Amino acid sequence: MTTTRRDFLKTSAIASGGLTLGIMLPGLLDEAQAAGTIYTPNAWVHIADNSSITLISARSEMGQGVYTALPMLIAEELGVDVRKVKVAIAPPNAVYTNSLLGAQITGGSTSVRDGWEKLRIGGAQVRTMLISAAASKWHVDAASLRAENGMVLGPNGKKASFGALAEAASKLPVPTDVQLKDPKDFKIVGKATKRLDTPAKVNGSAVYGIDVKLPGMVYASLEQCPVIGGKVRSFDGAKARAMPGVIDVVQIDDGVAVVANTYWRAKKARELLTVEWDEGPVAKLDNAVMMAGIRAAEKDAKVISIKKTGDAAKAMQGAAKTISAEYQSQLLAHATMEPQNFTADFRNGKCLVIGPTQYQQGAQGAVAKALGLKPEDVDVQTTFLGGGFGRRLDVDFIVQAAQISKAVGKPVKLLWTREDDTTHDFYRPMALHRMKGGFDADGKPVALTFQLTSQSVTQRAFGLPKDTLDPFMAEAAVVGYGIPNMAQDLIIHDAGLRVGYWRSVSHALNAFANESFIDEMAAAAGKDPYAFRLSLLDQQPRFANVLKQAAQNAGWGTPLPAGRFRGIALMEGYDTYMAQVVEISMHDDHEIKVHRVVVVADLGHMVNPDTVEAQLQSSIAFGLSAALGGQITLEKGRVQQTNFGDYPVVRMVDMPKVDVTLVASTEKPGGIGEPATALIGPAVANAVFAATGKRVRKMPLSPDNIKAA
């Protein structure tokens, strides 16, 4: 996208001085209204006349720390205290596209990876322009000046604040070739930094979607079909309308909404609705039916190649020994701490929507389509997210809020219950893996095959053509082990239930199969699981390094207390190399207790080590919740789980000690919000094998599945 300064000013309601590098849209910031606005595709940063600095963040903050990490990148190159950088969330616009995902999306552990270069370049461009402005003002060589602590400093004690130079700098051309700092000179990036948003979250001033209030706002509670995708045939809202405080009862695409002057009144009145549903095809589904469909697809559907190395089929035929195994993974919910909610205000042919979303452009487009508007007539404002995990990449609840607001002619906050959230999710899909390994006469692995059959989220969400490789399904399918002949294949099958991206997406599915089966191959070869893996990593130094460090830190091979057992797993995901060793015990009823997790991560150049460690701990907690008991079950299309009572998550008492080692590296940054989620499951499964001699090939690692193994 390109725009001239004149074109931008025509559309921007810009009023006062300053320097903005990047595109600013009207109403985004009160203080970021610069007459000398300049566009560049590289960054979005504003310096006002009062020297305040604002980063216009293209990524949502959902606990992962981007409101600290991204300002650190700008502050490093500008030469300012990161605590002086404010953050404003960007509106929907193509210039804020995530270059790794092709849309304005927060997900896929991409925020720092996407911003690493563009934000540093943007900061360096602003620094260069400010120095040039000072050099022109003082009639000195720019090379004699430097930027430091929000000031440009020159010879003979000359100095000027960024704010004093901002307007003059805004009139200069944007430099296309700037000098970035050498990482060895970093003063901010790579240093442990306290979260900038912590004070607001502690004192309650941070605004989540659930906190939004608009003048004249009313509240809605939505009755949806107990079978996902079902539609209203007819309804009787008379009893609900008669309740105190009820303003209206309206039908929208997804159900019947009760609108009242308080949320509680809307919720209680909703319980009095009588609705007849057309349940649709999902009513025929349960987990067994869905798995049977997956098995049938193995015979009938197209096999899509992910990668081939050597000739796996030929090597398998000539192998002295082969082993094979099947692995299953079940449906999972996202279980965000903040239930789905959004506030909408439709008036005068335009719609404002405010709340927690990971996909601003998707929200804008979906609301526009549902209300018959132009996308530019939909204003999307993003709050803090009380968890995302991929659930808020979908925009169903945003469209619902907008439709209700249009129907009642008032600003409306739609708030789902926890039960609504659990029973109307976009679930992580079920999966079936078939693995096979071949050995030569000396027990050395010569072949490995991998086949995944599952549902494609990308086909549903983004219209991926049928029988096309879904790159998100291929995540972690290809292993780094030096096995000469390998084949990784994929079969895409629509199981009939709506599915969504879930934290770590297919890494968790594929790592469970791959890392469990590598353990099986080690056992078949009579080798130690750690030594077996290490022997296959001669050409993979980053893999080998994290594996060695994890084993050493965990005391692999040393005696454990009675009743304790270890498991190990290794994976690359999101450009991050990671190894985990877990220590578990098991009760007589086959319930697992995880006591310790040792994790070593090589994620390239770190921005904020504090956030990295927190994300590893968070990811492990999330992954353990899934591995130890997470499962969504259907009966006649109805989700049986409703709340944390029957869809448990790891609590403080369940949380193991997590020992984190971060490898110092100058490689490009990798993602850290998701890899540990994927790896904890197979590490625990391998520890269960060490404890029981049973190979549990079906997630979750529940007492029932362990007994059945």
Image: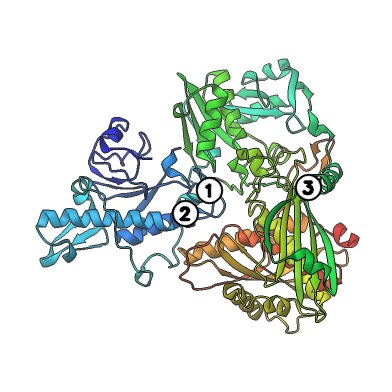
Q: Residues within 10 Å of mark 1 (few under 14, many from 20)?
A: few
Residue closer to the observer: 683 or 522: 522
Q: Secondary structure at mark 2?
A: helix
Q: Residue at x 47, y 54 (%)?
A: 114
Residue 197 seen in this snapshot: no
The answer to whether 348 is drawn above or below residue 202 in the figure is above
Residue closer to the observer: 441 or 69: 441
Q: Residue at x 73, y 24 (%)?
A: 231
Q: Secondary structure at mark 3?
A: loop
Residue closer to the observer: 573 or 650: 573
Q: Which residue is mark 2?
A: 114
- Residue 354: image location, x then y, percent: 50, 34
For this orientation, the residue located farthest to the bottom is 558
Amino acid type, residue under disc 3 in the picture: Asp
C-alpha gap between disc 1 and disc 3? 35 Å
C-alpha gap between disc 2 and disc 3? 38 Å
Q: Are the residues flagged by discs 2 and 1 in contact, CB closer than 8 Å? A: yes
Q: Which residue is mark 1?
A: 101
Residue closer to the observer: 10 or 475: 475
Quarter location, residue 658: bottom right
Q: Residues within 10 Å of mark 2 (few under 14, many from 20)?
A: some
- Residue 375: image location, x then y, percent: 48, 29
Quarter location, residue 119: bottom left
Q: Is residue 159 left or right of residue 50?
A: left
For this orientation, the residue located farthest to the right is 708
Q: Which residue is mark 3?
A: 646
